[in-house]
Image: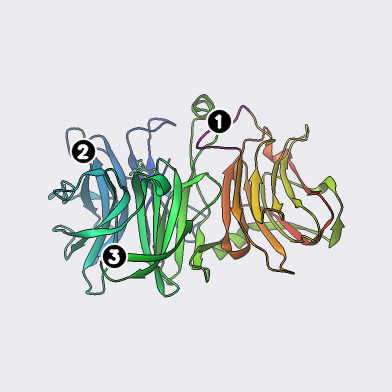
Amino acid sequence: MNDPNGAIQYAGLYHLFYQHNPRGAFSASKHWAHVVSPDMLHWQQYPHALVPQPGSYDKDGCFSGCAVVHEGIPTLIYTGVDPQVQCLATSRDDLRTWQKHPANPVLPAPPPGLEVTGFRDPYAFRGEDGLWRILVGSGIRGVGGTALLYRSADLLHWQYLNPLLVGQAAETGRVWNCPSFFPLGGEHVLLVSGQPVWKPFTFTGAFDGRRLLPRASGLADHGGCLYAPQVFIDERGRVLLWGWLWESRPDEDILAAGWAGVMSFPRLLSLNADGTLASSPAPEVETLRRQSTTLAAQSLPEGQRVIPALRGGCLELRARFSPRGARRFGLRVFIEENGNCTRVGYDADLGEVFVDRSRAGISAKMAFGWPNPPFHSARLALDAGEALELRIFLDQSVIEVFSNHGVVLSSRVYPAQPDACTVGLFCEGGAAELLSLQAWQLAL
Ligand code: FRU
């Protein structure tokens, strides 16, 4: 699987679609797979919602898109390839089966006169006039990525307005994939995935109905493994995100495993005062907590140690540290018998929270190299006296780290026996203090 698509809550149930190749763990023949859940955690698989139709406008794949309800009718808006065109499918049986619209493709070409580097991944929202707005991920040749803004009353006839925002190719990529656009904290946020920088960028600012005037930009995830996230607003008005966590192992290992790609936990979004995005795990995730382990507050001398009681492949770890004078400190996770592990910690000199996979316990070689380096970090300035908070979710090969101000880093590692792995602490260049540590086994 790759991108999440069509995230929507409908009649209380969460529906999530995703890019899926039923033929194997390689990128080809994109279908829309479909899962349904009451709580975003326990899923039931529905039949494929969209299947490429030989000889038609989506013969080479049903690429990413969104779900809306238009005049009571659940509707998917997606990209057919090749060439890239925008299409509709509707459901008359509560989202179980989908019929492609006879008017497809409803948007058969990019705006005339614009030399674009891509034209896909439609995302719809309502304008202040009550009409639909649709953003299509794109790029202007020689300039940078963009999201093209359209208006439509019926999803069938679309009027091109303008680029919502244009990026610089050197900074945020030549083409923007998978736009999401949503109000948050009194402002608007554009989320796009930039190719070929392979990062999920955010832009926050004022939306004047035609253009976004950004005052801040950032990343939706700093771990280097989350791409093509999609944001939706649920029936309670919560702004939620799912992202595709791609693999970090070589293709031959992926083929041997028989699967590739996982979905992140659902994340609740808010805005920091500086306009950057703050992510936290959706509160539903806490229902997965089982047996808990607590460690008393203690000084953390230089060196490293294992917490013997703490073992498992599916864990939530919640720790608070006071840096004191230490240079680097944090948790070691997925510690294998040979001592290999992944370090999740804070570098007080640099003011960065980091995930270091350079000694990750791995079942085979990691596919390190651009755009998949072993080390990822995010700027995180702690105020004087402010504790470092780490909330880490481990799930076999997945690490999701939430830190202060909603900074998040997602990563993938491949320990040979994740369930046998232990957790530990480390500290370098002085002594830090562990203020609290609580851990839970997680289970569905
Ligand atoms: C992003 C992306 C999208 C496209 C889909 C195809 O990962 O390239 O732009 O719609 O994947 O699977």
Quadrant housing residue 30: top left
- Identify the residue at horizontal 70%, vertical 52% (top origin): 347
User: Where does the image place residue 391, in percent across and percent down from the top left?
Assistant: 66, 58
Q: Is 246 situated above or below 384?
A: above
How far separated are the C-alphas under marks 1 and 3? Answer: 39 Å
User: Dot 2, how many residues are within 10 Å of its Cα: few (below 14), some (14-19), or many (20+)?
Assistant: some
- Identify the residue at horizontal 37%, vertical 43% (top origin): 19
| Mark 3 residue CB less than 8 A from any atom of ligand 1 | no
Q: Mark 3 or mark 2, which has the lower sequence index?
A: 2
Task: Tell me: 77 left or right of 327.
Answer: left
421 or 173, nearer to the observer: 173
Q: Mark 1 or mark 3, which has the lower sequence index?
A: 3
How far separated are the C-alphas under marks 3 and 2? Answer: 27 Å
Q: Mark 1 or mark 2, which has the lower sequence index?
A: 2
Q: Secondary structure at mark 1?
A: loop
- Identify the residue at horizontal 67%, vertical 53% (top origin): 350
How far separated are the C-alphas under marks 1 and 2? Answer: 31 Å
According to the image, label 3 marks what residue? 211
The segment highlighted magenta reads 364-374
Q: Amino acid at mark 3?
A: Arg
Q: Is 362 situated above or below 166?
A: above
Q: Nearer the viewer, mark 3 or mark 2?
A: 3
According to the image, label 1 marks what residue? 367
Q: Which mark is residue 158?
A: none
According to the image, label 2 marks what residue? 83
Task: Tell me: 283 left or right of 384.
Answer: left
Q: Is 38 situated above or below 343?
A: below
191 or 171, nearer to the observer: 171
Q: Amino acid at mark 1?
A: Ala
Q: Nearer the viewer, mark 1 or mark 3?
A: 3
Taking the magenta stretch, the answer to whether it contains residue 431 is no
User: Dot 3, how many residues are within 10 Å of its Cα: few (below 14), some (14-19), or many (20+)?
Assistant: some
